Amino acid sequence: MQSLSWLRVVCVALSVAFAACTPALAQPRPTPVATTAPVPAAATACRTVADCVLVPQPAPSELAGGACCNVCAGYLARNRAWHAQQPTCDARTRGACPMSCAQGAPPPIACEAGRCVLAYPPTVTACRNDHECVSVPRLDLRAPEGSCRLACGQYIAAHRDWDAWRGMLWQNASVTGPCPETCVDRPLPSARCVAGQCALRPPTAVRTTRVDLRAPSANGPLTAAIVTNVITALLPQLVACRQRPRSVAPIGYVGFTARLTVGADGRVTSADTGELGNHLPDIAACMATALRGASFARTSAVTTIEYPMGAAFAQP
């Protein structure tokens, strides 16, 4: 009887303890919030690159008072004297955060426009032929720290091997800052080798001289013969297409497949010129507009068309 009484006491005590602990266990741990204090001008001021030092980028958890951690492969460029005066994170009091990160090659630093910045490596432009040269984005030296440092729509010419190495080094946004996808200009300017140095090709216009039509395939009520007759009538409009001046490589001939969708009312609802847009986007858009203006007879259903074509081009 006494053993049963003792057992009840133990059970009641455990129930009270569990009830007291349950709310604490149910509450989630607070998530550290990064502090976004503005960087003072003295933190990045410089006159020469010797005034600058490369330092690891602290993780948001460290900035919020957590353990001492660094962002994987993240770096900052700081004024050497200013950084030496800053307090350091003591892992003995705040705890160390283990890192399992392949650091790779750290970015170089530079003094640009009076400010310490993470920089691209010195550009290599020596070349022996056109194939060795590519166009790469130009850096905006006055972009605020942490923002996109790529000058959208502006390019320089560099050696292809240098660009491949640079692309592997800057896999994160710690060097250039996160850039919006709209910053990328799809029809990149072309580069060439001039007197042993890579340079952007001067802008030039391109005109269409001939359009060749192969045998189309049609899936729907419209026959291939009907499609051929309608598209053949559009040849003058296709040949009239021009490319505005761009820094593009010389292109003599491009084979491509035009894909059209024709509704039951005979109107073209979509037209795409495929591979042509990768070479001459203006001419591709012009031809797609001409194809969308085609008019077919009314039918009972939708027709999808694939029309192999080829076009010859020349500079005016």
Image (cartoon, rainbow, N blue to C red):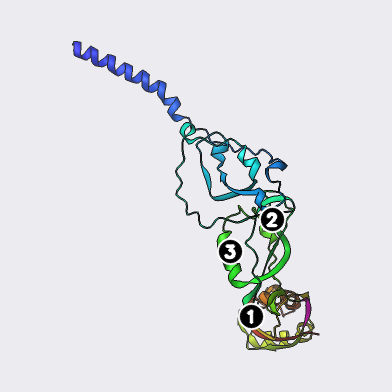
Q: What's under tag 2, amino acid-wise?
A: Arg
Name the residue type under label 3: Gly
User: Mark 3 = which residue?
Assistant: 167
45 w.r.t. 205: above or below: above
According to the picture, the residue beneath numbered tag 1 turns out to be: 128
> How many angstroms separate mark 1 from mark 2 (CA)?
30 Å
Q: Picture quarter containing residue 166?
A: bottom right
Q: Which of marks 3 and 1 is nearer the N terminus?
A: 1
Between 70 and 262, the residue placed more toward the observer is 70
Task: Determine which quarter of the picture holds residue 124.
Answer: bottom right
Mark positioned earlier in the residue sequence (1 or 2): 1
For marks 2 and 3 on the same chain, the one whose residue lies earlier in the sequence: 2
User: In the rendering, at what x and y percent does residue 152 appear?
Assistant: 72, 61
Q: Is label 3 or label 1 in front?
A: 1
Q: On the picture, is 26 further left or further right than 45?
A: left
Residue at mark 3 to residue at mark 1: CA–CA distance: 22 Å
The amino acid beneath tag 1 is Arg
Residue range highlighted in magenta: 202-206
Quadrant occupied by the N terminus: top left
Percent position of residue 55, x then y: 58, 47
According to the picture, the residue beneath numbered tag 2 turns out to be: 149
Residue at 49 percent across and 33 percent down: it is 94
Instruction: Give the structural element (helix, strand or loop) at label 3.
Output: helix
Dot 1: element: loop
